[in-house]
């Protein structure tokens, strides 16, 4: 059974709690990033969270008696997906949240499906550009401009932080269609591929982080809230959340499971406002709504659609989505 053939047959009460929980976990990840970068360099934060996520998935892998991939070709492709699907975007979100609110980072994450589509069409040739998708892209781009508030002028650290968050979403835009073309058809489970991907990303970060940011600090020297944030990002955001997402796909179908894209920014905004007391300008939530409308149009969520291919967001399970 694959993500694109799973029928939407399970009763609502069987998968809705997990669906909401997934939106809460991924939406809250931006809060944990904000707390983490207060004491940790973004590269060190990413290293710790990815290593924690890798350990979590390896434990799950062992419990399920699954195994890591054994083909060198798969590991070679995973090096690309690990860089663009984990190491780079996680780090960019960390740098971005040193300059912008966590809720705004959550909004930028919602642009991922819009970035995936043109790359999937033009570069990886895994999707076709239809009129509906072109309209969705246009709406999404307009929403991006509204979120940025381009009429107020550009520049400053806040604008730079937004571009970093957009760059993180762009990295997912490379990783998702790449893994769909070169990895998704392999015989290994999504759990196996993701555990391997996190191991590769951990190795990449272990090499780069000391060169760029110096030796990682000893965890015992960090505050309790930062340690808790790292554990939440790794164990929940890229561990438990991945298992929940696979369950949602199996029980509700890929199309329904992919709509968690719309919940993530909602929870990111709520958590940022309630816990951190963050506030946004009027145009940022308005732009976010336009972006989500563009995503809905591009993915065929409005009106009837035939079950053609897996939506971009639905391919994300093979790319750990711990935001």
Image: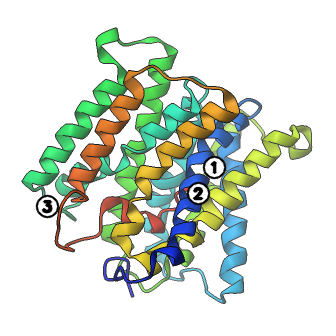
Q: Are marks 1 and 2 in contact (CB under 8 Å)?
A: yes
Given the current orientation, which residue lies at the most extreme left position? Answer: 131
| Element carrying mark 3 | loop
What mark, if any, has residue 205 been given in the picture?
1
Q: Is residue 61 left or right of residue 92?
A: right
Which of the pair 220/312 is nearer the observer? 312
> In the image, is residue 192 above or below residue 44?
below
Question: Residues under labels 1 and 2: Cα distance?
Answer: 6 Å
Answer whether residue 125 is visible to the viewer in this image.
yes
The span from disc 2 to disc 3 (Cα, nearest Å) is: 31 Å
Where 268 falls versus 124 (above or below)?
Answer: above
Nearer-the-camera pick, 263 or 182: 263
Categorize mark 3 by other alpha carbons within 10 Å: few (<14), some (14-19), many (20+): few
Q: Quadrant of residue 217?
A: top right
Whole-percent x and y of residue 248? 49, 73
- Please determine whether, in this image, residue 180 is positioned above or below residue 201: below
Mark on residue 128? 3
Which numbered disc flags the more N-terminal residue, 2 or 3?
3
Mark found first going from the N terminus, 3 or 1:
3
Q: Nearer the viewer, mark 3 or mark 1?
A: 3
Q: Residue at x 29, y 37 (%)?
A: 290
**Which residue carries the number 2 mark?**
201
For the question of whether residue 323 can be seen, the reply is no
Element on which disc 1 rests: helix
Which residue is depicted at the point 59% across and 57% down? 201
Disc sitting over residue 44 in the figure: none
Report the number of discs: 3
Between disc 2 and disc 3, the foreground one is 3
Q: In the structure shown, which secondary structural element does the residue marked by tag 2 occupy?
A: helix
Residue 17 x/y as whole percent: 57, 67
């Amino acid at each position: 059974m694959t993500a694109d053939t799973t029928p939407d047959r399970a009763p609502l009460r069987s998968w809705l709690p997990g669906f909401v929980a997934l939106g809460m976990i991924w939406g809250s990840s931006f809060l944990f990033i904000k707390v983490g970068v207060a004491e940790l360099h973004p590269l060190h934060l990413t290293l710790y969270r990815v290593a924690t996520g890798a350990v979590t998935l390896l434990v799950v892998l062992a419990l399920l008696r699954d195994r890591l991939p054994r083909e060198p070709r798969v590991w070679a492709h995973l090096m690309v997906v690990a860089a663009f699907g984990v190491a780079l975007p996680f780090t960019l979100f960390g740098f971005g949240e040193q300059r912008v609110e966590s809720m705004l980072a959550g909004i930028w994450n919602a642009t991922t499906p819009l970035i995936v589509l043109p790359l999937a069409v033009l570069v990886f040739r895994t999707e076709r550009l239809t009129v509906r998708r072109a309209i969705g892209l246009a709406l999404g781009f307009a929403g991006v401009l509204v979120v940025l508030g381009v009429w107020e002028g550009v520049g400053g650290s806040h604008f730079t932080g937004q571009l970093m968050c957009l760059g993180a979403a762009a990295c997912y835009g490379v990783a998702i269609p790449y893994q769909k073309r070169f990895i998704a058809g392999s015989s290994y489970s999504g759990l196996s591929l993701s555990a391997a991907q996190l191991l590769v990303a951990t190795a990449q970060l272990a090499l780069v982080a000391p060169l760029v940011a110096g030796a990682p600090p000893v965890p015992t020297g960090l505050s309790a809230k930062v340690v808790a944030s790292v554990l939440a990002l790794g164990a929940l955001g890229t561990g438990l959340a991945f298992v929940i997402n696979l369950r949602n796909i199996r029980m509700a179908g890929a199309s329904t499971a992919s709509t968690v894209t719309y919940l993530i920014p909602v929870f990111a905004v709520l958590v940022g406002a309630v816990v951190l007391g963050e506030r946004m300008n009027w145009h940022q939530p308005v732009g976010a709504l336009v972006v989500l409308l563009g995503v809905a149009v591009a993915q065929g969520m409005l009106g009837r659609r035939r079950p053609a291919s897996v939506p971009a967001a639905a391919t994300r399970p093979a790319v750990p989505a711990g935001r």
